[in-house]
Amino acid sequence: MAILYFLGGHDPFLEGGIKITMRALREAGSDPRVMLLLWGLKREDAERKAAELRGAFRDLGGTAEATWPDEGVEAFARKLRDSDMVFIADGDPRTMQRALRLSGMKKLLQDYQGVIVGDAAGAMMMSLMALLPPDRYSSTYNMILGLNLVDFCVVPHYQRAADQYVVEASAGRIVFGIPEGSAVMYGAGILSHSGTVHMFKHGKRTILTDQLFV
């Protein structure tokens, strides 16, 4: 099964995030090849972000290339076979969800066996259900279908002000509130974390503070 990294929404190449990114790259193998998914951004912004990420991954010993929604399922499957890591960048979750579903990438990622890293909204979309903050579509937290890689939910950029919504959402599922600078990692049925992470279950909050990986 894949090894999954859920980033709380910080720059993964600056202090506070670089150790987590390097850990993920080590798990991807030597000279890792990274597929970049920037499908929650407008194309012009995504191309600019892709250039930045290519340089950042190159500095860490990886080779990164962007994949676009219009390339087709056969191209996706081939690129996934050749990739050691998939990096799902931050962006608009609704735009991301639509592109992942309509392109066929959602189904392919469910069978992927490498490392998948989601940054902020990218991390949200990796779950069965993505818990979205209030936006122009809803005045409260609401849920949309995610990639269904795990059955728990994550809330990146977590702050205690969100507790009234997150507690309610945890009535039938586990929700992890991941502040900026923290991360959750899940693989082979084992969950660990970096930094302080808040776990909500049955309406109750537990603070996970042990540094389980660095």
Image (spheres, rainbow, N blue to C red):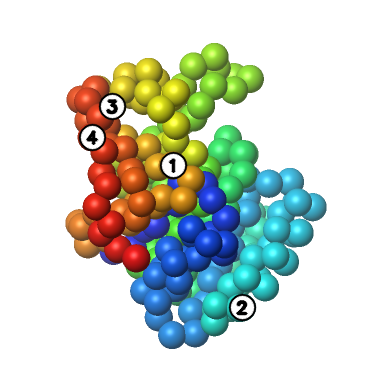
Cα–Cα gap, marks 2 and 4: 38 Å
- Residue sitting nearer the eye, 189 or 97: 189
The reply, left or right, for residue 57 in relation to residue 182 is right
Q: Which residue is mark 3?
A: 170
Judged from the image, the secondary structure of the residue bearing numbered disc 2 is: helix
The residue positioned 53% from the left and 55% from the top of the image is 88
User: Amino acid under label 1?
Assistant: Pro
The residue positioned 58% from the left and 73% from the top of the image is 57
Other residues around mark 2 within 10 Å, as few (<14) / some (14–19) / many (≥20):
some
Cα–Cα gap, marks 1 and 4: 14 Å
Residue 158 in the image: x percent, y percent? 44, 35
The label nearer to you, 1 versus 3, is: 1
Which callout, 1 or 3, points at the residue further toward the start of the chain? Answer: 3
Judged from the image, the secondary structure of the residue bearing numbered disc 4 is: strand
Q: Is residue 195 above or below residue 81?
A: above
Residue 117 in the image: x percent, y percent? 45, 59
The residue positioned 58% from the left and 43% from the top of the image is 96
Q: Is residue 200 above or below residue 5?
A: above
Q: Is residue 150 above or below residue 145?
A: below
Quarter of the figure with residue 97: top right
Q: Which residue is mark 1?
A: 179
